Amino acid sequence: MIKEKNILKRIFISFCGPGKARMLRTSIFCILLSMLFGSLILLLLSKNPLVAYQSLLQGAGVLPKLNYPGKKSQLTGFLNLVDYTTPMIFAALSITIAFKCGLINISVAGTMIFSGILATVLVGYTDLNPVVARSLVVIIGLVSGGLLGGLIGWLKYKFNMNEIVVSIMINYIISYIVSFVINTKFADPISRQSVEIGQNARLNLMNVEMFGLKMNIPLLFPIAIFVVFLIDFLMKKTRFGFELKTVGSNRKASKYAGMNVGKTMIVTMMISGALAGLAGVSYYLGCYGSIQPRVQPSIGFDCIAVSLLGFITPIGCLFASFLVMIFQCGTSYLSSRLGVLREIPSLMTSILLLFSACAFYFQEKADACKIKLLKSRRPKNE
């Protein structure tokens, strides 16, 4: 029994313990653990876990399905996955850069709605040239999100207001104001959402016929990839990135060293807000094309767990975003193929996000287990 416990501890340490590629190993451990728990749920429902996870990948366009409707294929499914992943990448980066400065930006959902409604009202219903309209949408997302994030950073520095409380209140304020604006001015009488925007302002090309297929092409995905590497370079290779991480580690020491703590916090939150603004316009003027009143996007909160799964690194956020969106995009196909309620695959996604949030805890436990094992190997007379 003791040997079995030691074996389990060694396996746990091999995944989450210190050493090379620790972040990657811990992320893999979180994924495997969530898949194990998801498999147990499926077995309790008398369903085959292997078929379930295969269906998830097929529904997300990663693996080919048995058959497709007209003008659809694995490629069109994968492009839909990329389209839905794009706002998640921006949102996870928003959380990541704020975390690095020791701040928690809970206002991503509210910022997404704010940038989405501004871009919708100012550009979405106009007949501008597609290039001009889409460029303006991106600029509005950057500026509106940056201003909102800067406001939170300024309140934190100037009045020492808790950024979490401020962010939550801003989410509610924006949600109710936007709901009022949509219901009184821009509501579609049938769907009760905002009237769908024009194609000129959409950040994806809808129903493009190519290779005998009809596909949606996300225009902001290449920009999202570029921003991932830009933020990674900013945090690792620039003076501002060094100051950002130093302020996040110890504000008093940073101030003593001569760093402008207030400026660093405000600029960081402006960048975080701008990224959340990009998430908003790519979500509401890309994937969906309209805004539902009084409903905050789940991406605005899921991105926190995605950032943790990516170990608060830009490159990690890229891969973690794809993984989580594979789970979310494949739920409908899994549900229909296995004949289970849609809540079951959603529960599996929630389990993944839950274990993602425990990644740092697993590392601490692995360190403690390794110390205990090393002590147990020492001779008793030492």
Image (cartoon, rainbow, N blue to C red):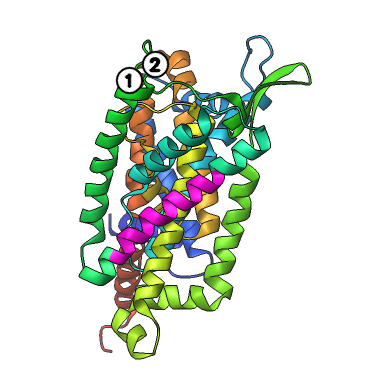
Q: Which mark is residue 210?
A: none
How crowded pointer 2 is (Cα within 10 Å; few <14, some 14-19, many 20+) is rated as some
Residue 220 or 45: which is nearer the viewer? 220
Q: Nearer the viewer, residue 258 or 43?
A: 258
Q: Would you name the residue on which mark 1 appears?
A: 45
Q: Quadrant of residue 191?
A: top left
Q: Residue at x 48, y 64 (%)?
A: 22
Q: How many marks?
A: 2
The residue sitting at 31% across, 59% down in the picture is 152
Dominant SS in magenta: helix
Q: In whole angstroms, how far apart are the C-alphas of marks 1 and 2?
A: 40 Å
Q: Is 141 a magenta residue?
A: yes
**Is residue 37 rendered magenta in the image?**
no
The residue that disc 2 covers is 188
Give residue 86's position: percent from left, percent from top: 54, 41
| Residue 173 horizontal side relative to residue 195, left or right | left
Does dot 2 land on a helix, a strand or a loop? loop
Magenta extent: 138-154
**Front in this rendered view, residue 157 or 3:** 157
One can see residue 212 in this view? yes
Select label 1 or label 2 by which is in front: 2
Q: Residue type at mark 2?
A: Asp
Q: In the image, residue 117 lies at what x, y percent?
A: 41, 35
Q: Residue at x 36, y 29 (%)?
A: 346
Instruction: Report if residue 62 is visible in the image.
Output: no
- Residue 332, position in %: x, y? 45, 20
Judged from the image, the secondary structure of the residue bearing numbered disc 1 is loop
Residue 371 versus residue 228 in the image, above or below? below
